[in-house]
Image (cartoon, helix red, strand yellow):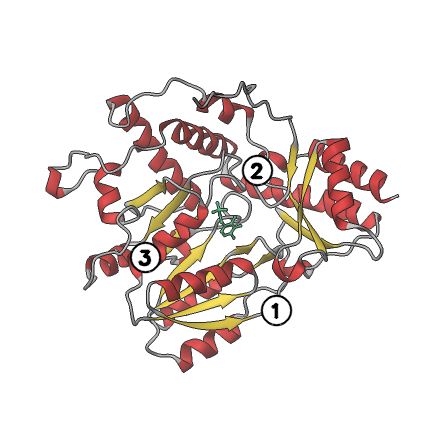
Amino acid sequence: MLVAPYIDAFNPPRRTLMGPGPSDVYPEVLAAQSRPTIGHLDPLFVGMMDELKGLIQYAFQTTNEMTLAVSAPGSAGMETCFVNLVEAGEKVIVCRNGVFGERMRQNVERVGAIAVVVDNEWGEAVSPTDVEAALRAHPDAKFLAFVHAETSTGALSDAKALCALAKQYDCLSIVDAVTSLGGVELRVDEWGIDAIYSGSQKCLSCVPGLSPVSFSPAAVEKLKARKTPVQSWFLDQTLVMEYWSGSAATGGKRSYHHTAPVNALYALHESLRLLANEGLEAAWKRHADMHQVLRQGLEGLGLKFVVDEASRLPQLNAVYIPEGIDDGAVRSQLLESYNLEIGAGLGALAGKAWRIGLMGFGARRENVALCLKALDDVLN
Ligand SMILES: *Cc1c(COP(=O)(O)O)cnc(C)c1O
């Protein structure tokens, strides 16, 4: 007979998370998540979901009806946009200036569509000039897809300008806002963004595993006009919306699609409630202010930023690892001696840079001070 081994409960240490995500979670969010589980169609739960939808709309600055949290992480939000909106054979202009733009390209190809890639250097913002050239060269393109805040490098692209170009050339825009939401200015309606997705564990400082998503009326039209069914049953927005809002087919009544991650949604409700109470613009300013304090300290340690000041993300600070320093040893020492996690370089920057996150609840003075002190000790 196979005997179950005795295993202790898992008790993680309290770390300070200053990498590319997950970020430090608000204590209120952890508390919210441990409240009693109720049914996913319980009237009280449904009332909470309505508030949650309003909070997601606020965070995105949109009145889009099709706004919800996908029950899976940011990557599923990305996939939701591509599988619902893009059909086989359609052309998509995909901007690639880091890891996540490349993942967008893979999504395009997996739905059988044609990706036209606009490459910019790692560490640089997406170039609107290059994008316009691609839009001009491909008048049959139906979408423009780009990453607003490229977490692999710390570069911020001009979403407002890029979405204006998409409109001008009759394309729908698909925007990755996983790291930007809550950390830098983002205005979905004003900037004319058609499909956007984010993640719970970056500047929202919620637990990982949820992806806020919103589709504009034009994106919903495109979805309704599909000639083929959405390939993914789970991510099919028209089916998911029957749970999030009800549908004409069910007389406006919500129906079961999948069991919502009830407690995780309490957590998202709490993190967005905290963001709304602080105010979006105040949160953006806090990220910018803390970035300035961190920047001064990092430069004082002789560290150089990967991204030019003009397109630098406050919430993701990529700095080059100094000559002769052992990347892995430094990060292990920070983790073991200071309970501090910073991010390794990703893709082209692996082994060459560190990524220091100042996201959500993590964007505060105590974190900046700890990080600077720990790096000073370990490097010197
Ligand atoms: C983290 C991240 C993702 C992926 O989100 P997961 O929650 O890890 O699936 C996508 N895009 C960007 C820009 C990210 O930073």
Q: Position of residue 152 (x, y in %)?
A: 59, 55
- At x 54%, y 60%, the residue is 157
Q: Please identify, in this view, whether the residue under mark 2 or under mark 3 is nearer the observer.
A: 3
On screen, residue 160 versus residue 345, left or right, reads: left
Measured Cα–Cα span from mark 2 to mark 3:
30 Å
Q: Position of residue 262 (x, y in %)?
A: 35, 28
Q: Image quadrant of residue 370?
A: top right
User: What residue type is disc 1 on?
Assistant: Glu
User: What residue type is disc 2 on?
Assistant: Gly
Dot 1: within a 10 Å radius of its alpha carbon, few (fewer than 14), some, or many (20 or more) residues? few
Question: Along the polypeptide, which appears first: circle 2 or circle 1?
Answer: 1
On screen, residue 217 versus residue 104, left or right, reads: left
SS for dot 1: loop
Looking at this view, is 12 or 26 the one in front?
12
Residue named by callout 3: 83
Residue named by callout 1: 121
Question: Along the polypeptide, which appears first: circle 2 or circle 3?
Answer: 3
Q: Position of residue 349 (x, y in %)?
A: 67, 59
On screen, residue 149 versus residue 86, left or right, reads: right
Looking at this view, is 100 or 49 the one in front?
100
Q: Please identify, in this view, whether the residue under mark 2 or under mark 1 is nearer the observer.
A: 1
Q: Position of residue 247 (x, y in %)?
A: 16, 41
SS for dot 3: helix
Measured Cα–Cα span from mark 3 to mark 1:
28 Å
Q: Label 1 CB, ligand 1: below 8 Å?
A: no
Residue named by callout 2: 360
Answer above or below: position of 227 versus 149: below
Dot 2: within a 10 Å radius of its alpha carbon, few (fewer than 14), some, or many (20 or more) residues? many
Question: Along the polypeptide, which appears first: circle 3 or circle 1?
Answer: 3
